[in-house]
Image: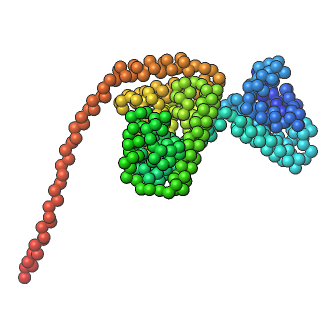
Amino acid sequence: MIYVAFTPYGAFGVKDNKEVNSLDDIEYKKLFDEEKIPEMLFLLRTNPNKMADELKEEWNDEVKLEILSVEPFKIGEYLRNNLFEIGKELGYFKNYEDFKNKMHYWNTELTKKLIKSYTQQKDKIIIQVAEAISDLDKTLNLLSERLREWYSLYFPELDHLVSKHEAYAYLVAKLKKRENFTKSQLKKILPSKLAEKIAEAAKNSMGGELEDYDLDVIGKFAEEINHLYEKRKELYEYLEKLMSEECPNITKLAGVSLGAKLIGLAGGLEKLSKMPASTIQVLGAEKALFAHLRNKATPPKHGIIFNHPLIKGSPPWQRGKIARALACKLAIAARGDYVGDYIADELLEKLNKRVEEIKRKYPKPKKKKKVKEKKKNKKIKGKKKPKKNKKRKM
């Protein structure tokens, strides 16, 4: 077994982790080309196992890397203590100033490569798209409420008849004037019964009259809201494509939106894959969790995974158990996505069986045990009697 430690300029190894006191004691050396040092450092940081395979093939023996070990190797300690001296002896550095400059350059180039690699990861794009959709939802709700209040000055009845913001904005942008809210026009867009109600309300509206110019401004505002709704649909389709390609297991179990939000809360697919199920279960409920830890409040049963239909559509006393089962399967799904294994069908089947078992086993909530309260004897504080002045004996 060869014990291997690395410096920026090469890999060095010794048999059986023996003591190293000089460069001559090092039995195996693989020196890096100076121009390729940043690339080799990047490979070592991102894929050390590939480096291990190359060394194993070159040195024709089993290798053990210090960077994958818990404890430092003796050769590693020697290399770190004599980094400049060894590099100078091997011809990498002319003097100490040259050593500092080259080390700075190599580390800067390595950092650039790591940042580039980080930004190219698809899960980071998924996080940004999910956040963009979330921001659009907030903006659309805000603008739609403003449109409703504004147009209600002219046609207040429409606000109560059309509940969906998107449909409301579409009607205002397309028809504008109350005279255009006829049965024939509305039936092209809405169900016939609702179309009749709106047409009748438009005839007898109690709203005030507005100039054509005012209605044009409102109509253009509604059109912009419609454009934002179209943009949201485009982003959602893009997110669906990304999730199905990069995270098929999570998508199958949690859906597109919830899966993307879980990845965002975790900080990436890699971090999510390393999380235990108990952490995934309460992702998004950090405030409630910290309140429990700090003030001994009731612990949260679930975080953002509450939005999953299996949890949201279940009775309150079953939700905690279903959330635990879902979190367990999501933890496995995330690991499958990270290594590229598709196991969603098997996980979904097991999850559905577990949910059915929970619903069969706990059809009714458990009866709470009555805790007998001990009666506390309350001391009744009476008024203090004034002390009588004792007469002094003469």
Residue 157 in picture, x, y percent from top left: 39, 47
Res 170 visible: yes
Name the residue: 49% across, 34% down: 188
Q: Depth check: give the residue in front, 299 or 199.
A: 199
State how many labels appear.
Answer: 0
Q: Is residue 183 left or right of residue 130?
A: left
Q: Which colour style is shown?
A: rainbow
Residue 21 in picture, x, y percent from top left: 82, 34
Q: Is residue 238 left or right of residue 362?
A: right
Q: Is residue 281 left or right of residue 390?
A: right
Which quadrant, please, contains the C terminus?
bottom left
Which quadrant, please, contains the N terminus?
top right
Q: Depth check: give the residue in front, 138 or 320.
A: 138
- Vertical arrangement, residue 6 with respect to residue 109, above or below: above
Quadrant in the picture for residue 9: top right
Name the residue: 38% across, 28% down: 314
Q: Depth check: give the residue in front, 267 or 124.
A: 124
Residue 269 in picture, x, y percent from top left: 61, 32
Quadrant in the picture for residue 383: bottom left
Q: Depth check: give the residue in front, 238 or 214.
A: 214
Name the residue: 8% across, 77% down: 391
Residue 125 in picture, x, y percent from top left: 65, 37
Res 300 visible: no
Quadrant in the picture for residue 5: top right
Name the residue: 56% across, 27% down: 251
Residue that protrudes farthest toward the bottom in the picture: 394
- Vertical arrangement, residue 21 with respect to residue 177, above or below: above
